[in-house]
Amino acid sequence: MAELATIARPYAEALFKASGSDLGGTAIWLDELAAISSNVQLQQFAGNPSVTVNQTFDVISGVAKTKLPDAAKNFLRTVIENGRISVLPEIAAQFRALKNAQSGSSDAIVFSAFPLEGAALADLAATLEKRFGRKLNLSVEIEPALIGGVRVVVGDEVLDTSVKARLEQMKVALIS
């Protein structure tokens, strides 16, 4: 994976510098392009020697739900011309890291047994920001195996307050 990171870094840094004040808007379309490009069938299509750059560009831009601005189109065309479609998810991850470093925030994934919305999510966000000492960009993923509670992953830190984790702790205590 170090190779992908090395390839993606110059693209992410150039895009970060070129975005200027519209980092949020750039992050939205870049995340969408990264999600599209992670499709295995698309990568096979783009890797086919008989497929042109324009055909690949048309397929990706046609699948995109949002209208791509000119900067996005230029960036996408550059990535396709250089044969770096498979690197787009890593470019997006490095772009988010640069964006977060500038704003002093971090991405956090909240795994929950049940959907979290509205006031519950806002309360949880406030508590977690106080606990981790920085602003967090939360995304929620449903994981029914947790039974209840939440597991929060912020970078390499994990806060697990799920029922499943507590049951595992009791199991270990009873066995030893």
Image (cartoon, grey):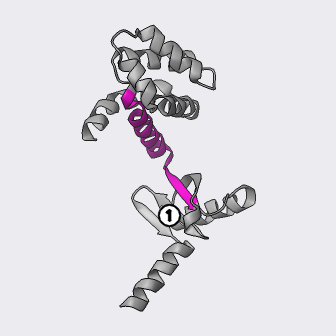
Q: Is residue 45 left or right of residue 60?
A: left
Residue 79 in sight from this viewpoint: no
> What is the x, y in percent for residue 85?
39, 25
> What is the x, y in percent for residue 122?
68, 58
Q: Quadrant of residue 158?
A: bottom left
Q: Is residue 106 left or right of residue 176?
A: right
Q: In the figure, 22 relative to 166: above or below?
A: above
Residue at 37% from the left image edge and 14% from the top image edge: 81
Q: Quadrant of residue 42?
A: top left
Residue 121 in sight from this viewpoint: yes
Please provide the residue range marked out in magenta: 86-111
Residue at 61% from the left image edge and 64% from the top image edge: 113
Q: Secondary structure beneath disc 1?
A: helix
Q: In the figure, 159 relative to 84: above or below?
A: below
Amino acid type indicated by mark 1: Phe
Q: In the figure, 8 relative to 125: above or below?
A: above
Name the residue beneath numbered marker 1.
132
Q: In the figure, 64 relative to 56: above or below?
A: below
> What is the x, y in percent for residue 25?
58, 30
- Based on the picture, tell me whether residue 137 belongs to the magenta stretch: no
> What is the x, y in percent for residue 48?
36, 16
